[in-house]
Amino acid sequence: MSEFEIIFQVLINGILFGTMYGIAAIGLSLIFGTMRIIFFAQGAIIIFFAYICYWLFTLLGIDPYLSLILVIPAALLLGAGFYYGLFKEAAALEQKEVSLLIAIGLLWLMENAMMVAWTPNPRTIVTAYTSWVLRPGGLVIPFTRLMALLIALLSAVGVFVFLKRTRIGTAVRAASEDMESTTLMGINPNWVNAVAFALGIGLAGTAGVAFATVYSFDPMYGFTFVIMSVIALAFGGFGNVFGALLGGIILGVLQSGASFFVSAGWADAICFGTFLLVLMFRPQGLFGKKV
Amino acid sequence: MANQLLEVKGIDVFYGDGQALWDVSITVEEGAIVALVGANGAGKTTLLKTISGLIHARKGEILLSGKSLSNLKPQEIVDRGIIHVPEGRRLFSNLTVLENLKLGAYVPRARPFFAESLERVFSLFPALKTRKDQKAGSLSGGEQQMLAIARGIMAQPKLLMLDEPSLGLSPILVKTIFELISALNEQKATILLVEQNITQALKIAHRAYVLKTGEIVMSGRGDELLANEEIRKAYIGERVSKR
Amino acid sequence: MKEERLAKYPFNLLKSLIPTKITRNLIYIIIVVLIIVAFATVPFFIDVDTSYFAYYLFLCFLYIVIAQGWNVVAGYAGQISLCQNTFFGLGAYTTGLIWLHDITKTGYYFDPVVMVLSGLVPVILAIIIGIPLLSRLRGDYFAIGTLGVQFTITVLFLRGGAFTRGADGLHLPSVVFESMTPYYWTGLLLALFAVAVVYFLTRSRIGLALRAIREDETASASRGVHVLKYKVFAFAVGAFLAGIAGSLFAYYLFHINPDSVMNLNWLFFPILMCVLGGNGTIIGPIIGAFFLAALSSFGSVYFPQTHPIFSGLLVILVMRFMPTGIIGLKDRILSRR
């Protein structure tokens, strides 16, 4: 491959991987907007759904893309369940530490439960189309990664339309800005939180399936993933669905580029350092709303 | 006597361990404008927040048309018709004017009347109609205040509570706002008005209460209090103003 | 009215036995002094080197310091700082590096100069990042900012090359370890110091300012309170406490690497302790520390394999059903009567 093609390939890889971060970031943004905590368990939940997808495929032969039909509603329900079961009381407290700790406790619990139940060995899904590859002009684009990108875009559009066009979605947007005012409109804050949470977990489910079709995964990867998603969110900006997605893509490109041009070891440092700089000098992210 | 729409009876309110309101009692008759005046930090906003359910009183009770509001969540109180337009407007600046108004009518009680409420609001505030698709944050201060009040009206209020509607507005706009409040009252709105601008508030109020460091120190008819020497000295300034 | 008075009767009775406020305060002071003396004389009654109880107490003291660190930043100043473990690690590394390179040339062991320096290095970081972060980022976003700091610094230490020796870290000569006793006393001293810091902070003008800021930042600012200065100060104090705790830990562990001194437990434990014991109180973190240290030590003894799952489950259950912590339990029980 020519130099130009190599660079382009690195770019494409980054974009494709970055959309994973992006979907997770949208979910984080929704939960942060309403509950004001970083939902650290997001990554573990993504991996959890990756496993679900894996088991649906391995044990029942359900194609990963088809499994979305099952996974998305299940994830939405799980999200609502998580909220009402775990976070409802804590969300009302002024001190956010309690919600934060519940999220972290959930992360620990899920990670370790998955480790015990499903062993720490990495899993991969291999379907008929896993090895399909598109080769536009010398570049290599795996079919599954493209599909993952498509899923990410569709999810983003779906969430966007929901937020902008439905009454409930508008309530969620309002609550992300000012929860107290929203309550004064007669809107039940728990209910708004639950919707945002359900959406967040729904997105995690989608990301999990998309991830499972492309990459191999193990129970402990969830934490790394959520950290990168937080960074993606900071890049993209809070309160903006497509911004979060773009933030993920930018991060993906940054990570891919740094990995390739500097070294895999320093890629992390570069990503974190950029994260810090963005927070210090442009806290609202590149596309976000006021902070 | 007109019906007592709102009765606040002897409430004590605490912020953590610090007491903010001591044995506060007020009543608001249906169809009246009742003003709550006092200096900064006297507890006016605290009282409104207690009525709207954002804060819980440790003692005492609050009745709407004779029914107790204690143990109700804020959103339920809104559904009963008590609408609190908070201090500093607290609009959803990233949402459009229309979206703000839509949210105003979110409550089940108000939702069926959305279309007519919207029409009414647009006729009261033509500027909002022209700007209906603009982001609320891009409106001027005066327009934002109008939107805040309009949003409150969308909820079909039985009792409209306005917290410092004239704050930060130019004198002309202040006059407009108070004319608006009077107009609303003429259209049968019951209004509880919290204000630092005592002169204007007392001019349009039927009755008023003076709140000082968490206690009601004086109450009476609006015009009486306006003429009252103590009040003039303490809050309006000693010089006789010929406004 | 009457029922209220009857319920308060025992307390009133007690109050009447202690005539004046001065006498009451005196009794509190005496109790505190007795407790301190009790702890201080433990090594004379128990063989500190072999006793598990002594180890437990040492852990308690260490935990008290980091818990109070979080207490200052979150409980009193109301900021969520997600880089406390970074400050802890920095303190540990400072101690390790000074020792290894024999910078202060005062010989080994528990050099107070080294400890103070280990506390100050995190303070410098706290000020450098605190000023831009606290001035630009509102509460919740500030937390994310500190998270960024945490990741960045952890990775930097991992890649620190020859200076920080990467993932393997610094190995201190453990031959100098003779007895647990100096650890115990230093730990006790640091714990007392941490509690004293919080005590005096709350009663000082700074404490009042912090409380005002936490309650209503815009109102305080409009009244001329220099919000940024106080926030950074609280942040720095939290950093200092974490740093000296890290220093003590370095002396104990002898092996300093990112995994042992910067791992996220050092971030979450203080939060957990303060929530358990009660945020924004002086005694809360102490209670939380004793509780968590007990769980830590028993956990590793009795449940070494399944430890992580249960800690996750435990945290969820406790936070879900006891969000106001142990101190909150008292209020909840009382309100049920």
Image: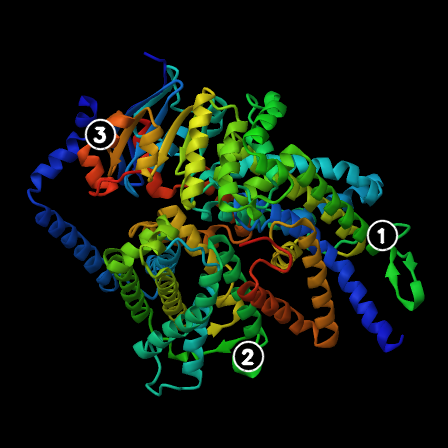
Which kind of residue does numbered mark 1 sit on?
Val
Amino acid type shown at disc 3: Met
**Residue at mark 1: chain:** A
Which image quarter: residue C221?
A: bottom left
Classed neighbour count for the residue bearing mark 2: other residues with Cα under 10 Å, few (<14), some (14–19), many (≥20): some
Disc on res. B218: 3
Specify whether residue A278 is in view. yes
Residue type (three-letter) at the residue carrying disc 2:
Arg
Q: Which residue is mark 2?
A: C165
- Residue under the image location 76 percent in, 36 percent down: A70
Tell me residue C271's x, y (percent). Answer: 43, 53
Which element is circle 1 on?
A: loop
Residue on which disc 1 sits: A126
Q: Secondary structure at mark 3?
A: strand
What residue do we see at 46% from left, 47% from top? A96
Q: Could you tell me how far apart the alpha carbons at marks 2 and 3 are, in whole angstroms?
A: 73 Å
C164 lies above or below B32: below
* Quarter occupied by residue A234: bottom right
Q: Which disc, if any, is residue B150? A: none
Mark 3 crowd level (few <14, some 14–19, many ≥20, 10 Å Cα): few
CA gap, disc 3 and disc 1? 80 Å
Residue A96 is left or right of residue B34, and the answer is right
Relative height, residue C123 to residue C38 (above, below)? below
Q: Nearer the viewer, mark 2 or mark 3?
A: 3
